[in-house]
Amino acid sequence: SARMLFHIGCEADQDFLAYIVTRGNTEFPMFHDLQIFHLLSLRFIFRDNQQANVLAKAFHVQTSLALDHRYVLYSMDRKAGQESEAANLGGAQVNAISVMEFNSGMERAFKFHLASISKMKAFWHVAARK
């Protein structure tokens, strides 16, 4: 039901959704997917950049994050940086085409990044046999 409320995007439900995510973090503190979702929702849904920055700094300290989680943090930082730069330039309005191009580029970069990691892993696996 929380997923549907996020999908609908009604502003009246934001307090309830923030409570659900916060409660989930307190009950499952080591579940990194939920923590990253909380960070993304703070930054892009609830627009609470101050609390998101505090949580992001705590994530950057952790070295045990999986590669996909570190990539999400990297892309979130890039996107937040681009939003702040656009706001500083007076062009805070981003059109749908530029967002689509950015997302397409990030997906392509992620795909090639994972492909290169798997090729490097295969290379070292073959090298270890010899």
Image (cartoon, rainbow, N blue to C red):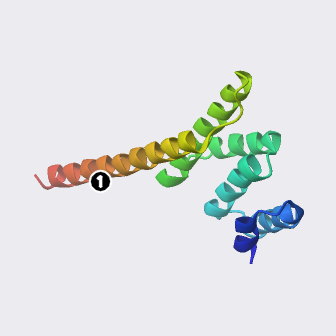
Report which residue position mark 1 lands on: 118
Kindly identify the residue that appears in the image at 30 percent across and 46 percent down: 116
Q: Is residue 106 above or below residue 30?
A: above
Residue 66 shows up from this direction: no
Question: How far across and down, in percent of the image, does residue 63 sit?
Answer: 56, 46
Question: How far across and down, in percent of the image, does residue 12 sit?
Answer: 89, 63
Q: Is residue 22 above or below residue 2?
A: above
Count of numbered circles in the view: 1
Q: Is residue 103 above or below residue 18?
A: above
Q: Residue furthest bottom?
A: 1
Amino acid, disc 1 = Ser
Kindly identify the residue that appears in the image at 86 percent across and 66 percent down: 13
Residue 18 or 10: which is nearer the viewer? 10
Q: Is residue 113 left or right of residue 66?
A: left
Q: Residue furthest left?
A: 130
Q: Residues within 10 Å of mark 1 (few under 14, many from 20)?
A: few
Question: How far across and down, in percent of the image, does residue 52 sit?
Answer: 76, 44
Query: The N terminus lies in which quarter of the figure?
Result: bottom right
Residue 58 shows up from this direction: yes
Residue 114 or 63: which is nearer the viewer? 114
Q: Is residue 23 left or right of residue 64?
A: right
Kindly identify the residue that appears in the image at 67 percent across and 58 percent down: 37
Question: How far across and down, in percent of the image, does residue 42 sit?
Answer: 76, 51
Where disc 1 sits, the SS reads: helix
Q: Is residue 80 left or right of residue 103?
A: right
